[in-house]
Amino acid sequence: MKKKNLLKKMGMMAVFTLLGTSAMAEEYHYLTFETTDGAKASVEINSLSMTINGATLVAGNQTFVLSNLSRMYFSVSDETSSATGIRQLDNLNLQDILAVYDLQGHKIAKEQMKKGVYIVKTPNGTYKIASK
């Protein structure tokens, strides 16, 4: 009888813990994944779907090798970065760009940007962008 009550109490504690976690998660807009090399990738939790196929985790538009993940947590803002600390950005005004570099590290004029990937410096930080 004591064993049954203990299991019941443990089950109730698990339910309350899960409810508390989901209530706290409502304050956050991203689920951030950190890899063993220190890179971070944030995925919006609104309509987030996650699947595991073998050793691979797909969360939103991000794919991870499970053995390379060190942790995941809820975050208020997008913490996407790489081991170099460069953050990825979707939209950027050309007026905000202070300097543009190609992937070889050469500084180029904003007007010379063609299709490709660039590193841009702004007053708010350094970003990796894809010019389409």
Image (spheres, grey):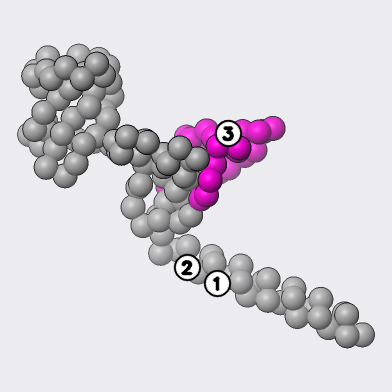
Tag in front: 2 or 3: 3
Is 56 contained in the magenta span? yes
SS at circle 1: helix
* Circles 1 and 3: CB atoms closer than 8 Å: no
Disc 1 residue type?
Gly
**Residues tagged 1 and 2 counted as in contact (Cβ below 8 A):** yes
The amino acid type of the residue labelled 2 equals Met
Residue under pointer 3: 65
Q: Alpha-carbon distance for marks 1 and 2?
A: 6 Å
The part of the chain drawn in magenta is 44-72
Name the residue tied to disc 1. 20
Q: CA distance from mark 2 to mark 3?
A: 27 Å
The residue at the point 32 percent across, 34 percent down is 84
* Type of amino acid under label 3: Val
Cα separation between marks 1 and 3: 29 Å
Instruction: Residue under label 2, please give it.
Output: 24
Q: Position of residue 126 (x, y in %)?
A: 21, 36
Up the image or down, 9 lies above or below 50; here it is below
Between discs 2 and 3, the one toward the N terminus: 2
Which quadrant of the figure has residue 66? top right
